[in-house]
Amino acid sequence: MKNRITVLILFLSGILFSQTHRFIYELEMKTEYKVNKINMALDIDKENVKFYDYDLIELDSVRIATNGEYMTDIESDQLLMRKLGTNKNLEFHELNFDYFVIESEDVMNWKIEKETKTIADNLLQKATTTYGGRKWTAWFSKSIPFQEGPYKFRGLPGLIFELSDDKNDFIYKLVKSKELPGTFNTSNYLENHYGQKPLAVSRKQFHKIKLDYYENPTAMYSQMFKEGNLYIGGELVTTQEQLDSKKKFIQNYLYKSYNPIEIDKAIPYKVNY
């Protein structure tokens, strides 16, 4: 974003969509535990818009180099794709090596304000909306006429450069852009998860899956516990008392680190520790 001319050339030279236009955002997320910074990729090609953790690109190269032995969890939980120009999203979620997809339709009702500001020679205009139970402020550029932005946010007359909610729990800032030849292949880690196809579920079904895991997060380790070779957090767990303690620790972490971007669709976790 440091050079407005670079971004404009990127758009104008690829206006026929023979390329993938990639915009990289720094996402700052806050939970009770910490502030996390993640680089996110917004890929726009002639058919689709994709949003995902930028690190997945590099990690996929490592996975290929190690013959599929290397895998990683998704840090942001904001993986999605949609057809260009539409509001119908496919949300992808990973949980304990399982992969799920949820369909959603997400329309933003924007109020475009008169206020403007300039960042690195880019003239930006302010817009506000309410979505997911949060109030949001976006800054967009009419000079980059992609009606897209981070996560599900779209529909403004220009690319979103900055986006934040009123509590600053989620802050997105455009930091870089590039042009890639052809359609960039994300099938290893977005449309699929390391060879695993996503299971289509409703949001209600997915909430139940997450709640079941929250109620007993150590259930998946039962066989290893019986065999006496269960390690959690680098510690050998040999007694039921230890296992119960680990269960409460995991529940505590899940509860306190849960800060969903769409709080009106939050999973109803209960204090269980």
Image (cartoon, rainbow, N blue to C red):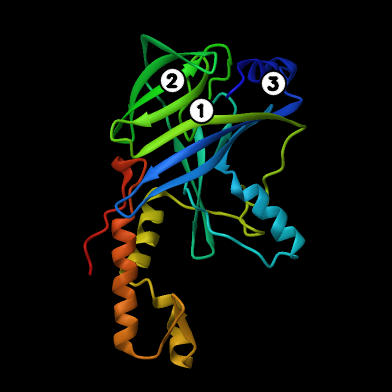
Task: Kindly identify which residue carries mark 1.
Answer: 149
Q: Does residue 110 appear in this view? A: no
Horizontally, residue 130 falls left or right of residue 92, namely left
Q: Position of residue 72 (x, y in %)?
A: 58, 60
Give the residue drawn at x 34%, y 23%.
129
Q: Nearer the viewer, mark 1 or mark 3?
A: 3
Q: Amino acid at mark 3?
A: Leu
Labels 1 & 2 near each other (Cβ < 8 A): no
Give the residue drawn at x 37%, y 41%.
261
Secondary structure of the residue carrying tag 3 is helix
Quadrant (top left/top right/bottom left/bottom right) for the C terminus:
bottom left
Task: Kindly identify which residue carries mark 2.
Answer: 139
Horizontally, residue 253 falls left or right of residue 74, namely left
Q: Earlier in the sequence, mark 1 or mark 3?
A: 3
The Cα atoms of the two marked residues, 2 and 3, are separated by: 20 Å
Q: Is residue 194 above or below residue 47?
A: below
Q: Is residue 248 above or below residue 190?
A: below
Quadrant (top left/top right/bottom left/bottom right) for the N terminus:
top right
Front residue (pair 239, 32): 32
Task: Kindly identify which residue carries mark 3.
Answer: 10
Q: Is residue 127 above or below residue 202?
A: above
Q: Position of residue 54 (x, y in %)?
A: 59, 44
Q: Which mark is residue 35?
A: none
Q: Earlier in the sequence, mark 1 or mark 2?
A: 2
Few, some or many residues within 10 Å of mark 2 (<14, 14–19, 20+): many
Give the residue drawn at x 55%, y 31%.
175
The Cα atoms of the two marked residues, 1 and 3, are separated by: 16 Å
Secondary structure of the residue carrying tag 1 is loop
Q: Position of residue 244 (x, y in %)?
A: 30, 80
Q: Amino acid at mark 1?
A: Gly
Give the residue drawn at x 66%, y 47%.
57
The picture quadrant where one finds residue 213 is: bottom left
